[in-house]
Image: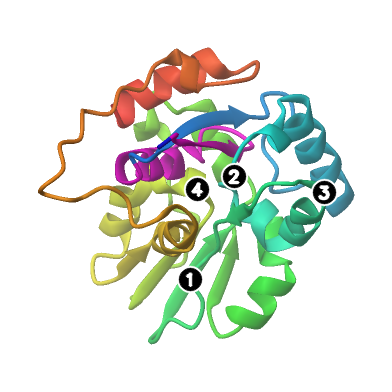
Amino acid sequence: MDKKRILVFDSGVGGLNAFAALNKRFLNCVFYYLSDKNGCPYGGKSVSQLLDLSLSLLKKHGADGFDGVVVACNTLSTTILPLIKHELSPPVFGVFPPPTLKGKTLLVCTERTADSYYVKTCCQVYDVIPAKTLAADIEENIFSLENISLNFLPEGEYDNVALGCTHYLYLKRAFSRRYPKAVIYDGLDRLLTDFGRFAGNGVFSVTTFCPPRVTTDDNFLGDDKVRNYAVFGKYFA
């Protein structure tokens, strides 16, 4: 059976977290990664800018020729995912902050995500902190994350901390140190579940031999493919 070809897209390196999780679980698919070197970060851009940037790059790299597209960006998913779905032929999947968590919850996200209809309706009881520069700081310091401070976050205890940007997943340990009693949510569980309905539940059969997954630079597309492959090698290979 031919493997499905899936394009994973984000503004920068954040979506590599989703790419790596999907790549590890769904061996019945071949994943390709694309990011927007010139447009990153997306969190402070208008809806029209987001639509123009994402669609132009996706179409330039032949998104309609893939079997599926994963928008591994909370900003795009919470604001314009229906518009992206309308413009592309294959099934499109997004990543979202987890809704309706019980207990005191802090949601850290981009400005555009904080202002989205999704957050205002599904996460309205959360303490929402728009981190204006955090995604850009992670993008710039991806090989030296120890330089990034979370001191801008509120003090106190939380039951849950939701990371509403895939870039922030690189700092999960730092978030855990700042909020040691909180459960840290990254939004990938829902993506894996939604994608699994499309692609099947992966290939975890103990009776089936599965060769090890080999990810090469051929799995990375666009102007930033060399850097994305280097980040993947450092954190996920």
Give the magenta part as a residue range. Answer: 2-26
Q: What percent of the width, then of the height, locates residue 105?
A: 44, 77
Earlier sequence position, callout 3 versus callout 4: 3
Foreground tag (1 vs 2): 2
Residue at 44% x, 34% y is: 2
> What is the x, y in percent for residue 161?
40, 68
Mark with earlier residue (4, 2): 2
Q: Relative to 224, is 4 above or below?
A: below
- Which mark is on residue 34? none
Residue designated by label 1? 98
**Image marks 1 and 2: residues in contact by CB distance under 8 Å:** no
For residue 211, side relative to residue 82 (left or right): left
Q: Which amino acid type is marked by label 3?
A: Glu
Q: Quadrant of the N terminus?
A: top left
Give residue 119's quadrant in the image: bottom right
Alpha carbon of mark 3 to alpha carbon of mark 4: how far? Answer: 23 Å
Residue 121: x percent and y percent?
A: 67, 82
- Label 3, residues with CA under 10 Å away: few <14, some 14-19, many ≥20: few
Report which residue position mark 3 lands on: 87
